[in-house]
Image (tube, rainbow, N blue to C red):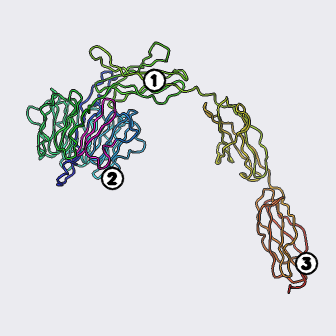
Amino acid sequence: MVQPHASTHPRSRGLLALAGALLTLLVLTLAPAGAQAQAPPSLIGTSGGHSCVVQPDGTPRCWGDNTYGQRTIPEGTGAVTQIAVGRYHTCVIKVDRTPACWGWNNLQQTTLPAGIGTVRAIAAGYRFSCAIKTAGAVVCWGDNTYGQLFVPSTLGTAKQISVGRFHACAIKADDTAVCWGYNSNSQVPVPSTVGTVKQINAGQGNTCAVKTDGTGVCWGNTSDNLTVPAGVNPVREIAAGYQHACAVKENGTVACWGSNLVGQTNVPGTLGAVSQLYAAPLGDCVVKADGAPACWGDNGYGQNTVPAGVTVGQTNAALAPTDVTASGATLQGRVTTAATGYQFLYRKLGEPAWSATPQTAVDSAGAVSTAVTGLVPMATYYVKVRAYPLVDGRYTYSATTAFTTAIAPPDAADVAVNPVTDLTVTGATLGVTVDTHGAPVSGVVEWGTAAGDYTRSAALYADGPAGARVLSRSLPTQFSPGTEYHYRVTVTNAGGSTSTADQTFTTPGPGAPTVALEAVDPLSFTTATVNAIVDLHGAALTSGTVQWGTTTSYGRSLPLLSGATATGGRRYTRPLQSLKPGTLYHYRVVVTTAAGTYDSGDQTFTTEATEPV
């Protein structure tokens, strides 16, 4: 529930945050011994500006203020099992038990925490939201101004969660209550006289609860006139609004008390018995016995004007299965709020007998699911939900839906390692021959210098027929000379992945480089350019120079300049300047690699004798 913002703007009362109640507990008659009862799913919610319900087919419906898109249901939301209404945002639990929120997100109140997974209860507050995860842990997100996101470590497994303006409350597994967050009016410490409870509601400056014996009680801001009036107790539900509160009495009728500034305590005389109660700051909503919602109080944004034809509830429904494989699926469904347990019934097309999953208790999320195995590949199955308890001595069922299992996957590929080919000081071609079992395959080779420590990888390319394909990869420059490498190949098809055992190969050490001199060109009376083709045979060049002089002692040298790749190696050049016209020069090219130092041998050239005119 959302709590009101302290504002005196004429319309602020229509935008005050919701102060709704969490719902009474539903005893799970099919739950195993020791299991805790949970609240039925919340199917209605209201705030200071908009209201929402879950309709019988599971689709959410909202009306009222839409300043931040809080009543616009996002495309793809689908059917839901719970809804919670915040000040300017809305949250739901979808049929796959995952939460979703939308609307105002100024403090990340609609941004779900990473890894939240599936949940079984959700609550939307002023500017923060909370949920009970499937395993029972509470997680909150959004505004943390007053520590309302710091869930107490003593909470453990929660059965119910309620969110107020700046504080939150939960019912623990032992039926005691705990609250945290803003404590301006002592609304957080639960009085020792409260004891165990079966429902709790966090308000603005106060908190209300229904004790195990049915007594409604409130604590916190005493100026809010929230003391339960005589004659109201015992109650089934209780909800704190802004300076007012309402309760559902044992006979199902509603009583409200406190401030009546905009008619929020004027309970309509036509309500009769109700099944759910939700209080906003200055208004209230209920679900009547016929499933119709009814709201009263502040209506500044039309939040209490229920659209014609809207009804609230949940029907039994078999939904599209998830995780469908060739031999199994997770059956999904939804049951009514009255259901305490369920089974899925399913059968293969053409077979008359239905198979039944075990009877399972319904949790507070309202969604139901069961995994089944032993199905036949590529077969159509019918499925429906059977809910408990009996109604008028009969089971209640959903409509029947159908799904088709997947094609049986092929066997995983068989892989045989091929010999390493094209082995050089820096390269190799690695590959395998694969029996694909008729399925498309992909492959990757991984390598490194230690067994199992594969630091690099590359995709393999396929060649050959689909049944027995050769997967290989040419890697001409990926390795170092004279080094042992470990590698493995992994091939994947629809049947899974197959990896080879660790394989090894060793690149040869670097060979001696060769130097082939080309003609000195261009050549003039004072300049000459030395050209050479150098083949390093895979080794790295440590140094390369051209030496020259008028004798074989040379006397001068300059480093080579690398050029383009050429036949037989790479071309290196070096322009020589300040030469004497008409002079014979000796020169040679010297290169050094890890394999040693090598030269081209002595060569000569003669500069032109006369400078051009």
On screen, residue 389 versus residue 547, left or right, reads left
Q: Secondary structure at mark 3?
A: strand
- Circle 3 packing at 10 Å, graded few (<14), some (14-19), many (20+), is some
On screen, residue 413 versus residue 152, left or right, reads right
Label 1 vs label 2: CA separation? 43 Å
Label 3 vs label 2: CA separation? 83 Å
Residue at horizontal 36 percent and vertical 27 percent from the top: 334
Residue at horizontal 68 percent and vertical 47 percent from the top: 448
Residue 196 in sight from this viewpoint: no
> In this picture, is 573 found above or below 163?
below
Quarter location, residue 313: top left
According to the picture, the residue beneath numbered tag 1 turns out to be 402
Quadrant including the C terminus: bottom right
First reached walking from the N terminus: tag 1 or tag 2: 2
According to the picture, the residue beneath numbered tag 3 turns out to be 606
Viewer-closest of 213 and 109: 109
Q: Amino acid at mark 3?
A: Thr
Q: Is residue 51 magenta?
A: yes
Q: Position of residue 314 (x, y in %)?
A: 31, 28
Q: Amino acid at mark 2?
A: Asn
Residue 320 in sight from this viewpoint: yes
According to the picture, the residue beneath numbered tag 2 turns out to be 106
Q: Secondary structure at mark 1?
A: strand
First reached walking from the N terminus: tag 3 or tag 2: 2
Q: Amino acid at mark 1?
A: Ala
Q: Residue furthest front?
A: 308
Q: Position of residue 495 (x, y in %)?
A: 61, 30
Read off the magenta span: 45-72
Q: Residue furthest left?
A: 230
Residue at horizontal 32 percent and vertical 16 percent from the top: 395
Q: Secondary structure at mark 2?
A: loop
